[in-house]
Amino acid sequence: MSSTIFHESSSTAVRAAISGPLTPVPDVPATEKKDPFLEALGGRIRNLRSRRGITRKALSQLADVSERHLANLEYGVGNASILVLLQVTRALQCTLAEIIGDVTTASPEWLMLRELLESRDEQTLRRVRVAVGEMLGTGGAHGGAGGARSGRIALLGLRGAGKSTLGNMLGEDLGFPFIELSREIEQFAGCSSAEIQALYGQNAYRRYERRALEETIQLHQEAVIAIPGGLVSDPATFNQVLSHCTTVWLSADPHDHMSRVVAQGDTRPMAASREAMTDLKSILAGRAAFYSKAEFRIDTSAQGLAETFALLRSTVRSALALPIHANAAA
């Protein structure tokens, strides 16, 4: 993170502007209705400038933005482009998040936490997340209390990865209930997932998704749960999965995903197969970094169903410290 100290290595004119009196505000329309977001953005720029002891004139020179435009921004009546905000950000030696507005920039403690965590690798960040979860009592490294392995087995992956087929088999083998979280969501809403999306939108679906997950966690200490593929797009809900479940990513080749969906009776992808395959690959690429947070990964394209289940079964039983050779599924 950039230092918050302003370095006095600028030109003589800029140093004079910094030490000199505040420049009068150029004409700013007093009667123009202000947008709340722009007004808050302007306030943050003004506060950051004041914190660094920089006059508006000096900032306009450093950012290469006209003083009038900067004044309009600070008073919430100017709609800046992203490029202009980037110029202001560099001049103030802060992050764009501090100007746009972000919970992690809301207080000095948040800013210091950002400073500590920035540039850390993924493994370090994971250890920090797990440690914070244990400290706050929201789940340990293995989704269970006190670091114990959770008996809730969450299967992650896109549709067509094998979550339903393998989840049913695993639940029967372990003697755990198998729960399709998408079905629980539909019960909460009283309509199908497609109808939720069409009638109420994506945000409403995500709210039902979180409620269904929270209730499942409360009601079941042991269960095999098929997680909807898009749940990872909501970090708060996904963190609940990671904090309270033993997680397995069922991955597959894009072509296997497509063929399995079609085999389930959904022929819609075939209507525009080239575009559908491109979209599928894009979704996989976008979600892979989140799916990879799972503790285990099994490639369901690498072998047949029986071999895949045997691998899943041994992986989960070993994780739960259960005998691997007992009650083997046929």
Image (spheres, rainbow, N blue to C red):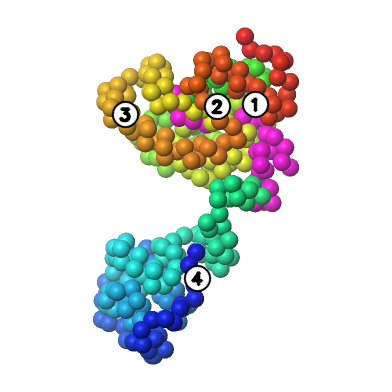
Residue 214: image location, x then y, percent = 58, 38
Q: Position of residue 203 (x, y in %)?
A: 42, 43
In the figure, 98 relative to 300: above or below?
below
Q: Earlier in the sequence, mark 3 or mark 4?
A: 4
At label 2, the amino acid type is Ile
Q: Residue at x 65, y 22 (%)?
A: 314
Which residue carries the number 1 mark?
A: 316
Q: Residue at x 32, y 24 (%)?
A: 269
Tell me the CA gap for discs 2 and 3. Answer: 24 Å
The mark total stands at 4
CA–CA distance between discs 3 and 1?
Answer: 33 Å
- Count neighbours of disc 2 (C-alpha within 10 A) and say few if under 14, some if 14 to 19, many if 20 or more: some
Tag in front: 2 or 3: 2
In the image, the segment drawn in magenta is: 132-160
Name the residue carrying label 3. 276
Q: Amino acid at mark 4?
A: Ser
**Which is nearer the eye, 177 or 308?**
308
Q: Residue furthest top?
A: 330
Q: Quadrant of the C terminus?
A: top right
Residue 18 lies in quadrant: bottom left
